[in-house]
Image: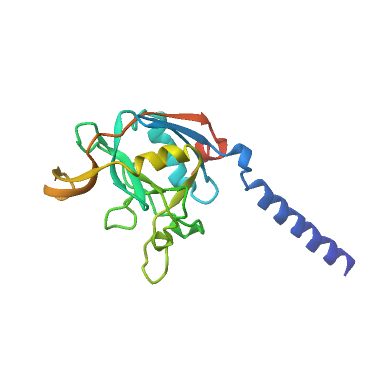
Amino acid sequence: MKLKHILLALIMIITITSTLWSITTIDNRAIVQLETSMGTIIIRLFPDEAPNTCKNFLSYVNEGYYNNTIFHRVIDGFIIQGGGFNKDLKAKKTKEPIRNESRQGLSNIKGTVSMALTIDNNSAASQFFFNLANNKDLDYTTQKGKGYTVFAEVIDGERVLEKIQKVRTKRIMYYSELYKRNVPLHDVPEEAIILTKATVLRNNKKVTEKKE
């Protein structure tokens, strides 16, 4: 009986140790700086809750994909969206969409950053948005069968977001490669808000070196 208890205790210790090693401390999470035409925003990623989403986002950053793109959708008190169009409002070519990770428990609360979607739940590619309010209706529920994956949080630049959300917007028509026709694009800033450069300030080995 004593031997059995010892074995059970060892199993518990191994399990707890494995769990601890799988947690990325806040000091080891990747940090990305977004320099915009209205100021600088700094975000910190959630690699444990959204590993594939973080890996995908960092790959776009490291390749310079986001440089000189625009924030094409601004809705005061709701979201600021970007990461998909150049300064001429031409959609940029993306990689293959990634699997949705919105079931991991993170909520679309104010100050978080999430991946944008089309009508498909697994359609996240390059576009992302800042939550300007507690948008919990964007979270995954079994009833909806859909949700927007939270992958980062804003740690500096809140005032920049406050300035951006107050800009004047308009409605335009543009040609969508997805739908192969002209479609309306709502809430486009009248004066372009440019993401001039995205830079990784601190990398996360767990995210960048994770083996499939």
Q: Position of residue 37 (x, y in %)?
A: 34, 29
Please name the residue shown 27% across and 53% down the image.
118
Q: Is residue 133 above or below residue 96?
A: below
Q: Is residue 74 above or below residue 12?
A: above
Counting the numbered discs, the total is 0
Q: Depth check: 3 or 138 in front?
A: 138
Compared with 106, 31 (above or below) is above
- 56 with respect to 178 (left or right): right
At x 41%, y 69%, the residue is 142
- Tell whether 181 sits left or right of 105: left
| Residue ranking furthest to the left | 181
**Residue drawn 55% across the image and 48% down it:** 48
Q: Nearer the viewer, residue 122 or 193?
A: 193
Query: Farthest right residue?
Result: 2
Residue 29 can be seen, yes or no = yes
Q: Position of residue 70 (x, y in %)?
A: 29, 35
